[in-house]
Amino acid sequence: MSDKKEKEVDPSTEEKIKNAARALFHQKGYSGTRTRDIAEAAGINLALLNYYFRSKQKLFELVMIEGLLEFVGSITKVFDDSTTTLEEKIRLLASNYIDMLSEQPDMPLFVLSELRSHPDTFLSKMNPQEFLMNSSFIKQYQQSVMEGKIAAIHPLQFIMNLIGMIVFPFIVSPMIKAIGNLDTADYKVLMQQRKTLIPIWIEEMMQVK
Amino acid sequence: MSDKKEKEVDPSTEEKIKNAARALFHQKGYSGTRTRDIAEAAGINLALLNYYFRSKQKLFELVMIEGLLEFVGSITKVFDDSTTTLEEKIRLLASNYIDMLSEQPDMPLFVLSELRSHPDTFLSKMNPQEFLMNSSFIKQYQQSVMEGKIAAIHPLQFIMNLIGMIVFPFIVSPMIKAIGNLDTADYKVLMQQRKTLIPIWIEEMMQVK
DNA sequence: TTTTGTTTTAATCATTTGTTTAACTCCTGT
DNA sequence: ACAGGAGTTAAACAAATGATTAAAACAAAA
């Protein structure tokens, strides 16, 4: 039943492996994950992993790329939409990302960890440089700076603050949970609140003083 | 020349191993680091690793604990000093941490990654909960909230913002460097600027609107 | 039913990797 | 000088681990 032109193979086995792999990679990283663990978690025979994907490395790169694309993709959509204002973009970013991360809370730490080990491998493939610097977001930002509406700080400083406020809490969730004695439900509430809080904070920060 | 009561062994070999181990662990994580790599980086025979430290695991825990203690220690000193104001604490935190992280930029990602894999192992040992919640910092914070000087947001939200603004840029440095086409020197300049910028931003954020 | 191609399985291989062993060197105190 | 202990080394071991193989099970087509 396999079709040569359409790569649409029966999803069950292949997808099961990929899902198990994604979960384990996110949780334990590349070298912390054993192929036998993936096989067991997916409920399949070990050899099937090499049958569907050529190697652990290949499987990893697939999961990694998919994660990065989803990440970058959802940023692109907001950053490049010239019909929304800068303030709306900030609100959308916070909202969309916090929702995404609430479902895959381990993703950012995974991506950033592996990115550190193989810096060029992935960053060169997706070339985030010119995309971001030419985006509608940055243009609107610089426009507002020129008009004196917001304080003149380096765009990268601003980006770090914005993305950091969104992503960082998910990276330190175990620590915050321990400090505040929170369970997962409590924590999710905090994160949801940030969807409305972050845009407010950012606006305050950007005020020309 | 070894002294039984004072554990002060000749630093050369033992320290060489620990330094090499710290660098590699920070860079590649626990399971990504091989004992042979440590030995080679330290310029010592492989067996010496098990001679001085019983196992890779023990060596790892040592490095990890030392890192965490330095991290927490430098926070404690600032947080618990009742002679400084809240604003001064914020300025000191930003300044001290950015200096520390500029020297060990890979430390936070390492600590946070490994913390995720073994959450209880370390967090239970250092019990950050009551220390932080009873600190002078939190008391001053809540005092200011009561007096209506700053906006009433959950202390944890505030902590996440503050620590996030300090630490997050170091976690995403490869990405930021790629986006902004910066070399390491450029990047350090950005980080140094944040020592004065973060306190300003934080103050703006806390304003009651 | 037979045939053909795909999927699955158990067993095995080859390498990596943490650890140990046993010998050897070097220094120090007696 | 030499006995003893600490430091160091090369070699080897045992377990873990990624990958492969050869055969079996299965499904669809002829």
Image (spheres, coloured by chain):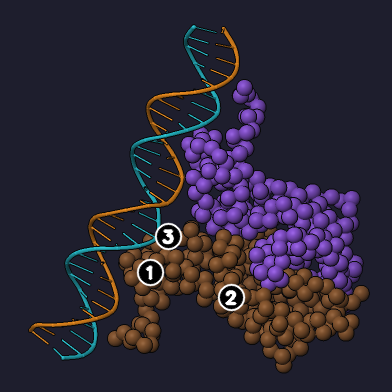
Chain colours: A brown, B purple, C orange, D cyan
Depth order, front residue of B124/A14? A14
Given the image, what chain letter belongs to the residue carrying mark 1? A
Disc 1 from disc 3: Cα separation: 15 Å
Total marks placed: 3
Q: Quadrant of the N terminus of chain B?
A: top right
Q: Secondary structure at mark 2?
A: helix
Residue drawn where x is 62% and y is 33% of the image: B12
Residue at coordinates 77% horizontally, 53% vertically from top-left? B99
Q: Which residue is mark 1?
A: A54
Mark 3 element type: loop
Q: Are marks 1 and 2 in contact (CB under 8 Å)?
A: no
Q: Amino acid at mark 1?
A: Arg
Mark 1 → mark 2, Cα distance in angstroms: 23 Å
Residue under pointer 2? A126
Quadrant in which the C terminus of chain B appears? bottom right
Query: First in sequence: mark 3 or mark 2?
Result: 3
